Amino acid sequence: MLLAVDIGNSNTVLGLFDGEDLKVRWRISTQTDRTVDETHLTLLSLLNTQQLEPSAIRGMIIASVVPPVTPVFSQMAQQFLGVRAIIVGVGTRTSMPILVENPREVGSDRIVNGVAAYHLTQTASIIVDLGTAITLDALDGQGRYLGGAIAPGLSLSLDALFSRTAKLPRVDLVPPPQTIGRNTVQSIQSGVFFGSVALVDGLVDRTRNEMEDDPISVIATGGHAQAIADASRCIQRVEPDLTLLGLRLIYERNQ
């Protein structure tokens, strides 16, 4: 089986593939102080929930935007699983040309999402990843990565309001019943949630106008993808496991 690991700023998602079949997906918090031993024990606990042994894992691939955590998972793979993890980065075969000024600056998660999106659609695509940050990435009809945009995510916006204002409370991130908030909590939820929807739709519209391709698929992924997609006029489909799919595809291309 293949263990795919997507290390994000807030959460780390682990997916276990049996061939092309994603058997199980786990989400744990990303902790920069977790040791190799602790990471191994966490994985053992997760595997135990599925009655699986570590020996079932014959390969591992990692995409990470948190550099201090990457070697912890890599060392855990080699020390306890006996496999050498592929770390997506410069030199990894993706079969996707990166048409930006400095390809080294592009986050590995964005590249992985692009590989998966083109595999699914075989058309020009706009990928909206709604996690700690909101990222938008554009691919042309040949599957080439054109670039994108980065904005604060919903949780970051809430945290900024709470930490940088004297009277506004910390609130739960849930879609409000309407745009016009009837109290402070609803007003904050409305501003952050519907503001993010408008941001996504506006960025997608502007990106479409700058692209020469037609048709263009718009795919959302990430922790807040479904909620934003339900209110968006531009998002066409939600793929919660887009990054894991991309990791599997890249792993296969590097064998």
Image (cartoon, rainbow, N blue to C red):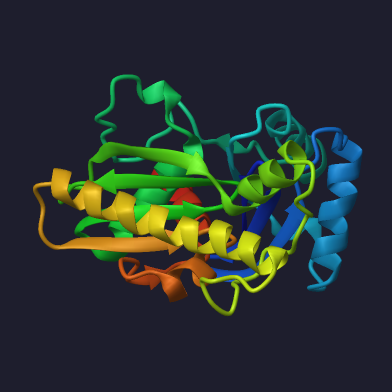
**Residue closest to the eye, 27 or 252:** 27
Measured as percent of width and height from the top left, residue 180 is found at: 54, 71
| Quadrant in which the N terminus is drawn | bottom right
Query: Residue at coordinates 68% horizontally, 45% vertically from top-left?
Result: 161
Measured as percent of width and height from the top left, residue 4 is found at: 60, 52
Report which quarter residue 27 is drawn in: bottom right
User: Is 42 situated above or below 80?
Assistant: below
Measured as percent of width and height from the top left, residue 228 is found at: 48, 67
**Residue closest to the eye, 208 or 160:** 160
**Residue closest to the eye, 189 or 240:** 189
Query: Residue at coordinates 15% horizontally, 51% vertically from top-left?
Result: 141
Q: Is residue 242 visible?
A: no
Q: Is residue 187 left or right of residue 211?
A: right
Report which quarter residue 82 is drawn in: top right
**Residue closest to the eye, 22 or 84:** 22
Q: Is residue 141 left or right of residue 151?
A: left
User: Is 132 situated above or below 214?
Assistant: above
Q: Is residue 42 left or right of residue 236?
A: right
User: Is 63 situated above or below 101?
Assistant: below
Measured as percent of width and height from the top left, residue 31 is found at: 80, 40
Q: How many marks?
A: 0
Q: Is residue 14 left or right of residue 218?
A: right
Report which quarter residue 239 is drawn in: bottom left
Residue at the farthest bottom position: 177
Q: Is residue 217 visible?
A: yes
| Quadrant in which the C terminus is drawn | top left
Query: Residue at coordinates 48% horizontally, 30% vertically from top-left?
Result: 89
